Amino acid sequence: MENTLGLEIIEVVEQAAIASAKWMGKGEKNTADQVAVEAMRERMNKIYMRGRIVIGEGERDDAPMLYIGEEVGICARPDAKDFCNPDELIEIDIAVDPCEGTNLVAYGQPGSMAVLAISEKGGLFAAPDFYMKKLAAPPAAKGKVDINKSATENLKILSECLDRSIDELVVVVMKRERHNDLIKEIRDAGARVQLISDGDVGAAISCGFAGTNIHALMGIGAAPEGVISAAAMRAMGGHFQGQLIYDPAVVKTGLIGESKEANIERLQSMNITDPDKVYDAHELASGENVLFAACGITSGNLMQGVRFFHGGARTQSLVISSQSKTARFVDTIHMFDQPKTLQLH
Ligand SMILES: O=C(COP(=O)(O)O)[C@@H](O)[C@H](O)[C@H](O)[C@H](O)COP(=O)(O)O
Ligand SMILES: [Mn+2]
Ligand SMILES: [Mn+2]
């Protein structure tokens, strides 16, 4: 899977990031999102593949592009029989977030990225647009920390696994009212908290790399982003667990359906019979091969954002593959027309 798709999916996230970065700092989050969606879709549809979007734009809103269930790739076209041999092609599932951190882009804040994950058909959990309680941690703590344990207990375990004292640990938490008790508990335990306004995919993946000074992600974010994070952590061997959150009283935003009961019914209609199940990375991204790709829109812990120069741009991407067991940083200069110089910095 990686051989045929590896390079092309880098271009998919690069094109989405470049399109979105043109709207960086302009205060228009919907446009920054929309152009990323269009660019991602356009490039994806040039790939010789038969793909299906399993996590995409708006499950409940009628998104016209990269909607859940949309088929993408040259070989998904109605006339595909004329130039594609279906027997040669594996069907793949794709989870996308063309602009992860739309607010970050709109306000020129760090940590936004164009991101996707790919696996064989059925290899990615088709998460509903619910919330998800998440726990991400470095590979050394994989299977040792546990989302069912308290933050205090997990910090003790992390401190042992990473050979650091608790006050040397940094936990990323999204700045939301629902996390007030969690933040207090982490601080009381002696660790330090890095609050982020948006972008918990980047925070989760940052736990996978030593040197980011991020040792865990805790708290509740969106479920689709949880699957994408899980795909990256699965491919790199980090720890990720997620549990769907269906009770509006826990989320405290009012954006999660009418009632807990109605949400449980909705989950059941999607064949999710145990709404409290804790999923680990291998269950959220269960395919034999999992490929993750991201390209920085604004600069963050892992990747530089898009840097434009006259006639071109430079991007930095990250591709993680379970197949080749690689985490590959890709640095690209894009020539829009014929630039006078190919700008390095
Ligand atoms: O920050 C996020 C926004 O993603 P996007 O809409 O693609 O720009 C995500 O990383 C979060 O996981 C998540 O979407 C968020 O926690 C849910 O939103 P909120 O109700 O504001 O917490
Ligand atoms: Mn997102
Ligand atoms: Mn998004």
Image (cartoon, rainbow, N blue to C red):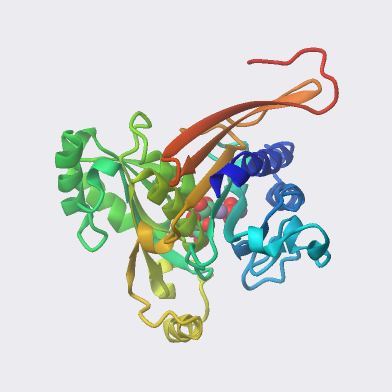
Q: In this view, does 192 lie above or below 290?
A: above
Residue 334 coordinates in the image, percent (x, y): 73, 27
Residue at x 65% of width, y 58% of height: 88
Residue 251 coordinates in the image, percent (x, y): 42, 67
Quadrant into which the C terminus falls? top right
Based on the displayed image, in which of its 4 quarters is residue 220 positioned?
bottom left
Q: In this view, does 175 lie above or below 209?
A: below
Residue at x 85% of width, y 20% of height: 338
- Of residue 340 and residue 151, the one placed in the foreground of this image is 340
Residue 303 seen from this side: no
Residue 236 coordinates in the image, percent (x, y): 38, 43
Q: Is residue 208 left or right of residue 30?
A: left
Residue 280 seen from this side: yes
Residue 332 coordinates in the image, percent (x, y): 65, 27
Residue at x 61% of width, y 46% of height: 5
| Labels in figure, total | 0
Residue lying furthest top in this view?
A: 341
- Of residue 47 and residue 156, the one placed in the foreground of this image is 47
- Of residue 153 and residue 55, the one placed in the foreground of this image is 55
